[in-house]
Image: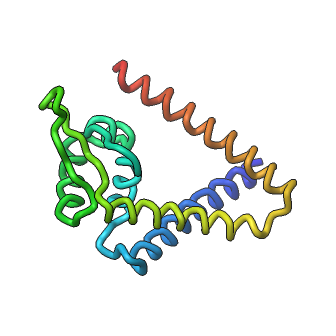
Amino acid sequence: MKDKFLEINRILVEIYDDITHIEEYSIKSGAFKDLSITEIHTIEAVGLYGSRTMSEIASKLDITMGTLTTAIDKLIKKGYVERSRSDIDRRIVNVSLTNRGKLAYRIHEKFHMDMVKEVMEDFNQDEEEILLSALRKLNKHLKDIYMTSDNKSNKS
């Protein structure tokens, strides 16, 4: 049993590392060489439509406001996002994507879809369903652990 757990752990770590490396390579060899993975994920958190508050984005990325402010400042200089104050409450800062940011978002989204399509070519329909079911269970379990430990640390 221990050998099975060790193999599952090794495979999960390898998959995570491989996807990260493929994603980094894709960004660095594509039209948006000036973006890091962290920056492209910040662009994803801002979202394609409308705007989000700094608080919403920081929460989604699970980072501090200070860290997000630094990241947004860099993305503004690079022309990917714009920041504005709320007309209703000037303390609220909204962030939205520029046209360049929207293009980066769409290209990165396409990268992920192409990667999944390519992986899934090796699976038959039954295997696809089994994989999807297993990934849903894994995702739920990890979220349950994260949310439980996050709630415990918030209560401390």
Q: 79 or 154, which is in the foreground?
A: 79
Residue 17, percent from left and from top = 52, 65
Classify residue 64 by image quadrant: top left
Residue projecting furthest to the left: 90
**Left or right placement of residue 131 versus residue 46 in this view:** right
Q: 147 or 156, which is in the foreground?
A: 147
Quadrant in which the C terminus is drawn? top left
Instruction: Identify the residue at image location x=85%, y=62%.
Output: 124
Q: 146 or 103, which is in the foreground?
A: 103
Instruction: Identify the residue at image location x=19%, y=38%.
Output: 93
Instruction: Identify the residue at image location x=42%, y=80%.
Output: 29
Residue 122, percent from left and from top = 78, 69
Q: 143 or 5, which is in the foreground?
A: 143
Classify residue 100 by image quadrant: bottom left
**Left or right placement of residue 124 versus residue 117 in this view:** right
Residue 88, percent from left and from top = 18, 27
Instruction: Identify the residue at image location x=46%, y=67%.
Output: 107
**Left or right placement of residue 74 versus residue 123 in this view:** left
92 lies above or below 155 = below
121 lies above or below 146 = below
